[in-house]
Amino acid sequence: MQLKKYFTVLFISFLLPFLGNAQNLVHGKKLFETRCLVCHQADGGGVPNMNAPLDGSSNVVGNDIARLVRIVKGGYSEKVPLDGYYYNNVMTPNPDFKDQDIADVLSYIRTSWSNKASKITLAQVQAAKRKK
């Protein structure tokens, strides 16, 4: 009986990190659908000359996590050159997003559609905010 409990605890402790990541992506998708989808579209394709695409975007799948965190948190109001095109619609800030919200929505975006970038951790978001 003791051995069965041991394996149950071991199995659950092995499974929890995967469940936590899945939950983060579910939460990230929900945030995307309520805050980002209108401008960036369900397929992440954006709107030509207005809202930058997220699917396949070099900025989204790139390594400049601090820039992504700043944009999600503070918005963006400059003309954006991206992969040979320009986008000029203002992105509204999300000052109410907690650090975990930012990590979740960025993880969802960086792993959705054709994007195959790494997920963003809470620690990465916190480090990016300290950089400023």
Image (cartoon, rainbow, N blue to C red):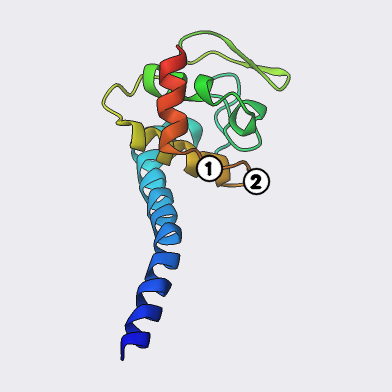
Amino acid type, label 1: Lys
Amino acid type, label 2: Ser
Q: On the rendered image, what quadrant is the C terminus found in?
A: top left
Mark 2 or 1, closer to the camera: 1
Instruction: Mark 2 or mark 1: name the one nearer the start of the chain.
Output: 2
Q: Is residue 90 visible?
A: no
What residue lies at 62% left-to-right and 28% top-to-bottom?
63
Q: Is residue 52 left or right of residue 27?
A: right
The image shows residue 38, relative to residue 24, as above or below, that is: above
Q: Position of residue 55 (x, y in %)?
A: 61, 38
What residue lies at 41% left-to-right and 20% top-to-bottom?
129
For residue 33, which quarter of the picture?
top left
Q: Is residue 102 visible?
A: yes
**Nearer-the-camera pick, 97 or 16:** 16
Q: Secondary structure at mark 2?
A: loop
Most extreme residue toward the bottom is: 1
What residue lies at 55% left-to-right and 38% top-to-bottom?
44
The image shows residue 46, relative to residue 116, as above or below, that is: above
**Nearer-the-camera pick, 52 or 121:** 121
Compute the Cα span from label 2 to label 1.
14 Å
Most extreme residue toward the right is: 84
* Residue linked to disc 1: 119
Q: Is residue 84 left or right of residue 88?
A: right
Q: Position of residue 130 (x, y in %)?
A: 41, 17
For residue 60, which quarter of the picture?
top right
**Nearer-the-camera pick, 42 or 81:** 81
Q: On the rendered image, what quadrant is the N terminus found in?
A: bottom left
Q: Secondary structure at mark 1?
A: loop
Most extreme residue toward the top is: 78
* Residue linked to disc 2: 114
